[in-house]
Image (cartoon, rainbow, N blue to C red):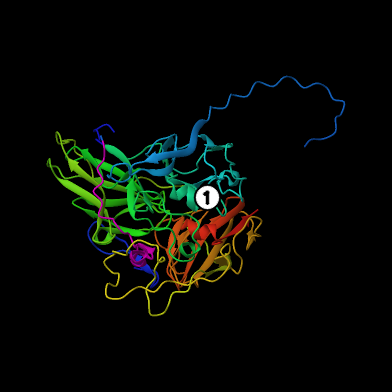
Amino acid sequence: MRLSSAGRPADPASETIAEEPTGTPTRRTLLQGAALLGLAPGAALAQGGRRPAAGDAAKETKPEPPKPEAAAEAPARTLTAGPGKLRLRDEPAAETAAWRFDGKAAPPVLRIKLGEELRLKVENGTDKPLSLHWHGVRNRNAMDGVGGVTQAPIAPGGDFTYAFTPPDAGTFLMRPLVVGGSSEPSGRGLAGLLIVEEKAPPAVDADVALLMQDWRLESDASLMPFGQTLLAASNGRLGNLVTVNGRPVPDIFEARPGARVRVRIANACNARGTRIRFDGMKVYVAAVDGQPTDTFEPLRATLPFPPGTRYDLLVDLPPEPGAKGAISALIGQGLVLASVVTKGEPISEKRGPIAPIGENKLLPAEIKLQNAVRRDVILTGGAIVPKDGAQNPGKDAPKDISKDAPKDRPQPEPVFTGDPAKVWSVNGASGAPGLAPIFSVKRGQVVVLALRNDTAFPQGLHLHGHVFRLLHPLDDGWEPYWLDTFQLLEGRTARIAFLADNPGRWLISATVLERFDTGLWTCFEVT
């Protein structure tokens, strides 16, 4: 793809991700980055993918004057999910039976301006129920897109129209989320991005979206079977081939020397968490999980990247032609996700230093914790990992080639002997339709949750309908960015605080979809 010029640690479980442009470390942190490397078995990841070019009773009343006609609603865009073939390997006749939107290999990237309504009619051409969750959008509850909770799932052959106006600008995921049935539509390829552009976006030469997915393939390029309980009870459905924007990595693009580029990168994998590293270019983080932050350079040029996470990056490319930069996933010896080469006439326009992209004034400048409603949220369940062994996703999994995996002895398998439909629990209950909320609060109440991971695995968690602050251990402050998704190490507790200002019944859910399908979610209510 060619781009034109137009276009501190808060807790032992956390990890420092940022430093000031001067190189002085700050207390910007995100949880669990180091643990993510242990999640990736990733066979065959040395890929050489090439990018081809009811009313009152009637009463006797005086007739009302006619009302002016309401303005016609804008027509909804249609997005059809259905089966299709993808060529994910170079071998002849190696095609994968995937699901795609509108028959296209590339996942959709929907762009609207802040203040505009999104109207999207989703048609389900697959043989399984479907709904689309707008991951990160502080949405109207009826539009959150959780099949079996906020809406009835879209039946095969049916459709549903999502209509909402996002309150915030930012980068958001579009991800299948049906209670008991999310892993397959995602694992077959259904995902996308919603980009809500600022009314006054930063001046850049290009705005690039990168959506990472992975695929769990057999040797003949067919998809390995879904619904395997041991995978759900352990690390989830980790793939052995990675794509960006629907094509095998790396995604390669060109830009003019000296260009300033905004890169939006999102992790839509079912289960794979990794770290991403930046080589050959200076990168500043401008937004985390869609919400703007003071710009900062990632510590050691790396960022944790669990499923559901999004970053907006601002990059100034070198001024000379032929310079190269890359974004790599720290899988195995490193896997390049995207690379850029400078080409063409250098940009001579003088620019100021990279600055924050703005402030979301709809979010509180301060969260008052003194009168907060406080609740414990305890995660239990999953497989048991032998004490003398490493985590392992099962005997049918690809060989673990990550650099930290033991090579001199076999890795014992995790063991699970419980109910396949109730593998995981939150506060003693496994998530299912009709689940009662674990707490209810009045709108405008501050909530502090102490989330404790009593499982044998790191857990990615997502707060629906809201964004939160990650608190320091003594509630003496919080990390200087808003999040909707984070990773909690096994055996650890983290506290988050948020203003419950969005009415409805909302989920706290696993971002590893196989765990979500087998009960790793709960809900709360804002009235």
The quarter of the rendered structure image containing the N terminus is: top left
Specify the principal SS of the magenta part. loop
Q: Is residue 471 above or below residue 467?
A: below
Q: In this view, which residue lies farthest toward the bottom?
A: 388
Q: Is residue 102 left or right of residue 179?
A: left
- Whether residue 429 is in magenta: the answer is no
Name, please, the residue furthest toward the right: 60
Q: Residues within 10 Å of mark 1 (few under 14, many from 20)?
A: many
Quadrant of res 57: top right
Residue at the image position 22 percent from the left and 58 percent from the top: 22
Drawn side of residue 81 relative to residue 88, left or right: right
Q: Position of residue 109 (x, y in %)?
A: 40, 38
Label 1 residue SS: loop
Range covered by the magenta-colored residues: 28-52
Q: Position of residue 220 (x, y in %)?
A: 35, 50
Tag 1 residue = 177
Q: Is residue 289 left or right of residue 46?
A: right
The quadrant where residue 523 appears: bottom right
x 34%, y 59%: residue: 274
Say whether residue 38 is magenta: yes
| Amino acid on which disc 1 is placed | Leu
Horizontally, residue 254 falls left or right of residue 369, namely left
Residue 412 visible? The answer is yes
Disc tally is: 1
Q: Position of residue 272 (x, y in %)?
A: 38, 58
Q: Nearer the viewer, residue 296 or 440?
A: 440
In terms of depth relative to the viewer, which is nearer, 425 or 209?
A: 425
| Closest to the observer, 321 or 81 | 81
Q: Identify which residue, 183 or 110, lies in the foreground.
A: 183
Place of residue 327 in the rendered image (x, y in percent of width and height, measured from the top left): 26, 51
Could you tell me if residue 354 is visible in this image?
no
